[in-house]
């Protein structure tokens, strides 16, 4: 099994409610688990990017650099506010046998 990066947008709103709504939605898509998506996460950590860095770039850099705060596939996802939306991102465990959706 490997860790797969994921980036998932949600409408702006209550962070926790939107996070768990997405987790439930993605778990319903793949009830067997190990999907490499937000479905594998149980918590998230809010980040504020520097003013000079676009939030999407900030999230992508954290993932590509395997930032310790979001690198654990069993640990929390990251979250930034991005252009009126919420962006949840990170690394999640997946089974190579599962198809990506």
Image: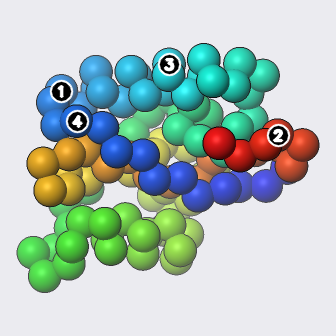
Give the CA separation, mark 4 to mark 2.
27 Å
Q: Secondary structure at mark 1?
A: loop
Marks 4 and 2, the one that precedes in the sequence: 4
Above or below: residue 67 compared with residue 5: below
Badge 2 vs badge 3, beta-carbon distance below 8 Å = no
Q: Quadrant of residue 55?
A: bottom left
The residue drawn where x is 53% and y is 74% is 64
Give the CA separation, mark 3 to mark 4.
15 Å
Measured from the top left, where is residue 51 in percent x and y?
A: 9, 75
Give the CA separation, mark 4 to mark 1.
9 Å
Give the CA separation, mark 1 to mark 2.
31 Å
Marks 3 and 1, the one that precedes in the sequence: 1
Give the CA separation, mark 3 to mark 1.
16 Å
The residue at which mark 3 appears reads as: 24
The residue at which mark 4 appears reads as: 11
The residue at which mark 1 appears reads as: 14
The residue at which mark 2 appears reads as: 98
Q: Secondary structure at mark 3?
A: helix
Single out the mark in the foreground, 4 or 1: 4
Marks 3 and 4, the one that precedes in the sequence: 4
Screen quadrant of the C terminus? top right
């Amino acid at each position: 099994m490997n860790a797969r990066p994921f980036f998932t947008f949600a409408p702006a709103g209550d962070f926790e409610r939107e996070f768990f709504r997405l987790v439930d939605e993605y778990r319903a898509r793949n009830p067997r688990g190990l999907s490499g998506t937000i479905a594998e996460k149980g918590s998230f950590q809010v980040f504020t990017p520097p003013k000079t860095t676009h939030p999407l770039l900030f999230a992508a850099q954290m993932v590509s650099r395997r930032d310790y705060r979001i690198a654990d596939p069993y640990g929390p996802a990251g979250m930034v506010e991005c252009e009126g939306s919420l962006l949840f991102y990170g690394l999640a465990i997946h089974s190579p046998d599962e198809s990506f959706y």
